[in-house]
Image: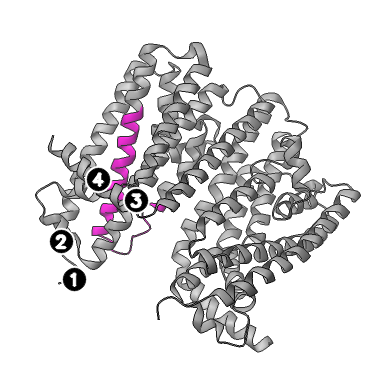
Amino acid sequence: MHFLKLISTFFKVNVQMSLAYRADTVVNILLNLMWLGWELLGLNIIFSNTTSLGGWGIGELIALLGVFRLINTLMIALIWPNTQRFNESIRDGSLDYTLLQPAPSMFLVTFSRITVWRIWDLVLAVILIVVGINTAGDVATLPSILTFLLLTISGAVVIYSLWIVLIALTFWFTKFDNNVTILQALLDAGRYPVTVYPVWLRIIVTYIIPIAIATTIPLQALRGELPVERILLFVAVSIVSAWIASLVWKAGVKRYSGASS
Amino acid sequence: MLNIFKRLWQVNWAEQWQYRANLIMYLLYWLVSPIIYLAVWTSIANSKGSVNGFTAGDFVNYYLVLLVADQLTSNIVIHNFAYKIQDGALSSELIRPIHPMLTNTLVNNLAFKALILIGFTPVWLILTLIFKPDFSGVTWQGVLLAIPAMLLGFIVGFLLSAAITSVAFWTTRVYSIHEFYYALILLFSGQFVPLTLMPKLVQDIAQFLPFQLFMYYPVQLILGKLTTPQIIQGFVVGFVWLGLSILFFNFVWSRGVKKYSAVGA
């Protein structure tokens, strides 16, 4: 309850801040639609030349685009603005005040900035997923849709945890402030099933910067390709990674000594 | 004049050299999407034998040469000029007796390119070892033709980016317009897929736009895939766009500078 209250407060504050930039918001939504058009055109071009990509049909790839956009929204609406603020607060010492507040600092640092208009993007992503699943037709069953949802959430948790570890490294290496760039750079690999990539790239985006866990893996669950033990494994991975992230964060905060005073 | 450029080079090279640590991140950004497209299209070509005449090997050749062309023809004007208009730093450059865009910013772009090439060359060589392209179709005539084509592509791209960045004289924020421009490049330059695999409509429009000069046209020149009429048409369209982009840049710049009133100090 406590956290929900905090999130809704953060949300209100951010809505007020973004109302100051109305024209910007309209332009951004239009640009966002343009990119959606481009992505769909891209899929159309691919599927006018073939009937399947890595064994997947167009329906699955539309759903994958939806999942990719969910993770992308997580990046743009939450990860980038909060990283920027966090890096500033380490440099000028204002992190002190965050640490003094009576709520977990990891929570405050990672949720206080939200690019509100991106909520719209979540709606688009859900539409894409629903349309994709429908187009894929007989592939999806109720249990596979449920495991798909479960693994999408656990994939997002893995990305979130990796992000926390990346920004927490700033406590040790102050100069490490383009930490999130590496996540963003590899994110594009989530647009297509990783099974089409060369082995080395597949290893990078599955195990090192696990974009695939949040994109390809949920889609494989939707197609009913994952045995139960692997589903449990991915859920366990997400729980463990969140736990590790919180440990790293706590150790980092202990190392922190204010910059200004 | 030569002395001015020499001094500007020293200053800008020193400035770019400070950022060499960001080089890896930049290279990563620039590598990922062509490699993804390459993987997608080779996988399709492998499953069907060929796509519209393109075999997996053809795609490998195309994207590996495209990486070079992209590197040589692209520019970073928006990143090192827009903020000067926004925060007023341009004032000190405007009082100098030389054109800020066509001297300092141009040299800054060239210094950036030189630095990138140092990092790029070994990475590209490693990629050729991984993907094993077949460059037996490359002729010296093609390469000799591609050099002026890429130079043309760089100049046209630079002037167009400069003109678009100059819109900041009116709107202060110019990144949205630039994003739209970037989408046009993606659609019409052949970056996503060789233009011949695009829908007919896109191809018909693309051959009269400047964007194919950035990638598709020089790549196909190097790989020796164009007929003589196509080569001539490409250069004619390129020179027409050179003229248009000079006019366009002058138009926006001369009005923009008059409009400019420094923000801040």
Q: Identity of the amino acid at label 2?
A: Asp
The stretch of residues the image draws in magenta is A152-181
The dot on residue B177 is: none
Q: Who comes first in sequence, dot 2 or dot 3?
A: 3
* In this picture, residue B263 sits left or right of residue A195: left
Q: Who comes first in sequence, dot 3 or dot 1?
A: 3
The dot on residue A12 is: 4
Mark 4 neighbour class, 10 Å CA radius: few under 14, some 14 to 19, many 20 or more: some
Q: Which residue is mark 2?
A: A96
Name the front one of labels 3 and 4.
3
Q: Name the quadrant of the C terminus of chain A.
A: bottom left
Task: State the CA–CA distance, disc 2 to disc 1.
Answer: 9 Å
Q: Identity of the amino acid at label 3?
A: Leu
Q: Label 1 is found on which chain of the structure?
A: A
Q: Is residue A158 magenta?
A: yes
Q: Identity of the amino acid at label 1?
A: Ser
Task: State the CA–CA distance, disc 2 to disc 4.
Answer: 24 Å
| Local secondary structure at mark 3 | helix
Q: Which residue is mark 3?
A: A19
Q: Is residue B168 above or below residue B129?
A: below
